[in-house]
Image (spheres, rainbow, N blue to C red):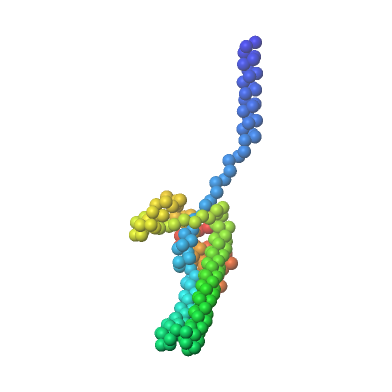
């Protein structure tokens, strides 16, 4: 009788274990994570260099205009000292000086707003270009996620503050095969190197030597 009970219990345990195993979810496939050094891409993207050059030219032009206005202000400040305070000539020059100063302040404020807006638009354009290229390559090479990282090692850093930031970076070690920085940068700069439009997808032609599409 005892043997029969133990046999029934063994069958019940085996059946329960089998059901539990059947109901447990199958192990999920690991996610592939790509890495990109955004600072490196921005620094070496030819389009960013062109846009920054245009912005710098506008800054220099605005600085030249501001310099002319400052020289006029300085000249008027020197001239007004020739007249007695309260005289008609003094009051006329003082009014001209105040008008010019108001014009200069308005010019400086408007220039700062315009340049800040253009700089913001520049970064927006470049960031959009880069993220589109990242998306294309991630879909091509089957990356589920792409994260920012700093590819510089501590031996390449001389600035103390940057060294501390490097030591605090998220990734201590990374597999170079997951670094898509060069692939994306090569794709972005291809029109500047060949004069032809960039390919629709950063595929095999955009891969560095020795690297093939990941399945």
> Considering only vertical position in the picture, is 197 above or below 177?
below
Q: Nearer the viewer, residue 170 or 20?
A: 170
Q: Position of residue 73 (x, y in %)?
A: 45, 82
Query: Which residue extends farthest top?
Result: 1
Is residue 47 left or right of 4 when viewed as pictured? left
Q: Position of residue 205 (x, y in %)?
A: 52, 65
Query: Which residue extends farthest front?
Result: 86
Q: Name the residue: 54% across, 68% down.
A: 120
Q: Position of residue 181 (x, y in %)?
A: 48, 61
Is residue 161 left or right of 58 when viewed as pictured? left
Q: Nearer the viewer, residue 205 or 71?
A: 71
Q: Position of residue 209 (x, y in %)?
A: 45, 62
Q: Name the residue: 62% across, 13% down.
A: 3
| Count of all numbered marks drawn on residues in the image | 0
Q: Name the residue: 49% across, 70% down.
A: 48
Q: Nearer the viewer, residue 1 or 24?
A: 24
Q: Is residue 82 visible?
A: yes
Is residue 41 left or right of 20 when viewed as pictured? left
- In the rendered image, the quadrant that contains the N terminus is top right
Image quadrant where residue 10 sits: top right
């Amino acid at each position: 009788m005892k043997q029969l009970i133990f046999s029934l219990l063994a069958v019940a345990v085996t059946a329960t274990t089998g059901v539990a195993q059947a109901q447990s979810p199958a192990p999920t496939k690991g996610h592939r994570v790509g890495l990109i050094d955004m600072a490196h891409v921005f620094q070496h993207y030819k389009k960013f260099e062109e846009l920054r050059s245009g912005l710098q030219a506008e800054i220099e032009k605005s600085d030249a205009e501001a310099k002319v206005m400052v020289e006029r202000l300085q000249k008027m400040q020197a001239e007004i000292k020739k007249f007695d305070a309260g005289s008609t000539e003094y009051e006329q020059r003082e009014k001209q000086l105040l008008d010019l100063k108001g014009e200069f302040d308005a010019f400086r404020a408007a220039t700062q707003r315009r340049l800040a807006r253009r700089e913001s638009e520049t970064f927006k354009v470049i960031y959009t270009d880069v993220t589109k290229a990242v998306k294309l390559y991630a879909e091509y090479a089957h990356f589920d996620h792409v994260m920012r990282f700093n590819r510089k090692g501590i031996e390449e850093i001389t600035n103390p503050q940057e060294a501390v930031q490097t030591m605090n970076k998220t990734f201590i070690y990374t597999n170079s095969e997951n670094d898509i920085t060069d692939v994306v940068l090569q794709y972005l700069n291809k029109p500047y190197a060949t004069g032809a439009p960039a390919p629709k997808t950063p595929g095999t032609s955009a891969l560095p030597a020795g690297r093939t599409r990941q399945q």
